[in-house]
Amino acid sequence: MTLSGKLTKKLVENLSAGRHGDGNGLCLVVDPSGARRWIVRVVVKGQKNKKGAPLRADFGLGGADIVTLNQARERALEYRRMAKQGLNPRFNVRQEMPTFEEVAQQVHIDRMPTWKNAKHGAQWINTLRDYAFPKIGRMPIDRIDQPEVMMCLAPIWTQKHETARRLSQRIKIVLDVAKSKGFRSRENPVTAIKDAQVLPKVKAKPRHHMAMRWQDVPAFYADLKAKKSMSAKALMFTCLTGARTGEALGLRWEELDLEIRLWTCPAERMKSGEEHRVPLTDEMLAIIEPLEAMGSKYVFEGQKRHHPMSNMSMLMLLRRMNVEGVTVHGFRSTFRDWAAEEANAPREVAEKSLAHTVGSDVERAYARSDLLEKRRELMCMWSQFVTSRRN
């Protein structure tokens, strides 16, 4: 039997926020956020509410992105038939309830445009795949409560605390989305577990990147400058700019303005998600200007044409130079120590040089300058210090 009503597929996809009737008690509810879900209102024969009037009740039929218009009409018809027979659909209907894994996979797909990059998107779903799906993946989403969440979190809470913390955030998101689609009505169990402090407090241990003493940098840089490899040039530039490995190796010529001596790293390549300007010194220009003749898209080209170097290339160079106990990222820490102990640089200037977020949300709202000229002075001082043992 073909069911019909006022709504169409196009209307379902485009209607603005509000409650839109299809007829026979079926409505499409569009939230201000854009979330869309089906609701059916029925009158249960022979049953009264607390005031003695006929029992009218609304029932969720699921999200419009999962339940089609025809499916919603069929389910609404089933609810009305039950109500006509005096059966309350709340206790008699058999819903097609998705599993936790099904909802999680859909959430992952829906959020793909928001991931910073493909790697972050993969990490999001992989955490659930490794620690949640084996235990609760096949369970109906409406049956998951505190004991099921604890099964996922408790085994790794102390041993892999950072992973467990991210896992709890992602489980919470999946359950919240399920509730917005009409598949759940209870409080989110992740919130309840957190509020009740069921899991033990874990003191996070700070992770320090192994760094070179700033006093040793000039001698190291002199040895590095004697090498002619591309990885040596990339490491010299990274050390001088205080950039992260990915930011330096992903440097494209289009990001550079050699005339005004400025490198503008776009927001999509920055950890903070905000554009970062790096002032270029004489030493930095001396490294990169000769490389322009190669005609590559990338300043530091790898083994493949128009492809950047491997992010392990600079670390392997350190190992070949027998520089132990030091990481490439550690040179950022080295610069920060030098800026505080030797240059007496203001904290804001040093932190901005490393593209760190400084201050509270309110402070950042008012502090709109990136202190470029002050940072230029500091970077010139750093270059002079680093190259002081060149000869």
Image (cartoon, grey):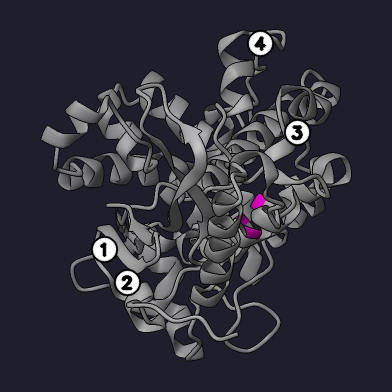
Residue range in magenta is: 120-124
**Mark 1 surroundings within 10 Å by alpha-carbon count, few (fewer than 14), some (14 through 19), many (20 or more):** some
Label 2, secondary structure: give it. strand
**Is 360 within the magenta?**
no
> 156 or 67: which is nearer to us?
67
Q: How far from the left and from the top, in percent, is residue 191?
A: 56, 23
Q: What residue would you read off at disc 2?
A: 256
3D distance between C-alphas at marks 2 and 4: 43 Å
The amino acid type of the residue labelled 4 equals Lys
Within-10-Å neighbours for mark 4: few <14, some 14–19, many 20+: few
Q: Is residue 143 left or right of residue 258?
A: right
Query: What secondary structure is marked by label 1?
Result: strand
Q: Identify which residue is drawn at 18% across, 27% down.
A: 363
Q: Are marks 2 and 1 in contact (CB under 8 Å)?
A: yes
Q: Of the residues under marks 3 and 2, which one precedes in the sequence? A: 2
Image coordinates for residue 142, horizontal then vertical, percent: 68, 40
> In the rendering, which numbered label is found on residue 262?
1
Check disc 3: other Cα within 10 Å, few if <14, some if 14-19, many if 20+. few
In terms of sequence position, does the residue under pointer 2 or pointer 1 come before the other?
A: 2
Q: Nearer the viewer, mark 3 or mark 2?
A: 2
- For disc 3, the marked residue is 325
* Amino acid identity at mark 3: Gly
- Label 3–label 2 contact, CB within 8 A: no
Quadrant of the drawing holding the N terminus: bottom right
- Tell me how far mark 3 sits from mark 2, CA to CA: 33 Å
